[in-house]
Image (cartoon, rainbow, N blue to C red):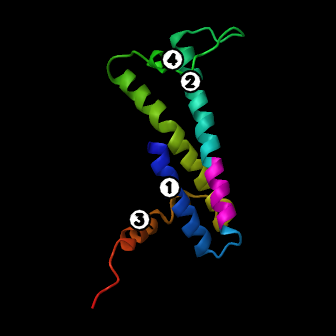
Amino acid sequence: MIGGILMILIAIWVYQGAMQVKKSNVLFWVAGCAILFFAVQWLLVQLNIVIIDTYQGDDIGDNYDRDLTSIGDRATNEQGTGGVFLNVLFELLPPFGAFLAVALVRTKFILGAPLSVSNLFSGIKEMFIGIKNSFKSTTDE
């Protein structure tokens, strides 16, 4: 759910950035960034599964066949701050890692700007202002 909402916002963000610099093939850039987002998110989810299984001591050998419906046994079963931190990390790492990958592509290849923290996150405020303004009525008579 977090990843889906973030993907919609990222698509708008990439579109606005590409339109700002008048990039050709804007929709191809948006589609490419969406594919990149999903691919990185999938890879990080797979990494989370490997980390959890390794952390629990499960044998990840040739005979290891995880049933996709057995999600319940992936819990870290840790109490206290460490368990909460790991669960939050495993939940938020895939979508925000994918966001950083798209931010790198947007900054370097779409905007052509040097890599810096301010350039990676540029345009986010303007995107939310544009979304807010899209709900305003234009019939001021």
The majority secondary structure of the magenta stretch comes to helix
Residue ranking furthest to the bottom: 141
Q: Cβ–Cβ below 8 Å for labels 1 and 2?
A: no
Give the secondary structure at mark 3.
helix
Nearer to us: label 3 or label 1: 1
The Cα–Cα distance between marks 1 and 2, rounded to whole angstroms, is 25 Å
Q: Cβ–Cβ below 8 Å for labels 3 and 4?
A: no
Q: Which residue is mark 2?
A: 49
| Residue density around tag 1, few if under 14, some if 14–19, many if 20 or more, within 10 Å | few
Q: Earlier in the sequence, mark 2 or mark 4?
A: 2
Q: Earlier in the sequence, mark 3 or mark 1?
A: 1
Give the secondary structure at mark 2.
helix
Q: Which residue is mark 3?
A: 128
Residue at the image position 56 percent from the left and 32 percent from the top: 45
Badge 3 amino acid: Phe
Badge 4 amino acid: Ser
Q: Which residue is mark 1?
A: 8
Give the secondary structure at mark 4.
loop
Residue range highlighted in magenta: 27-36
Q: Is residue 35 magenta?
A: yes
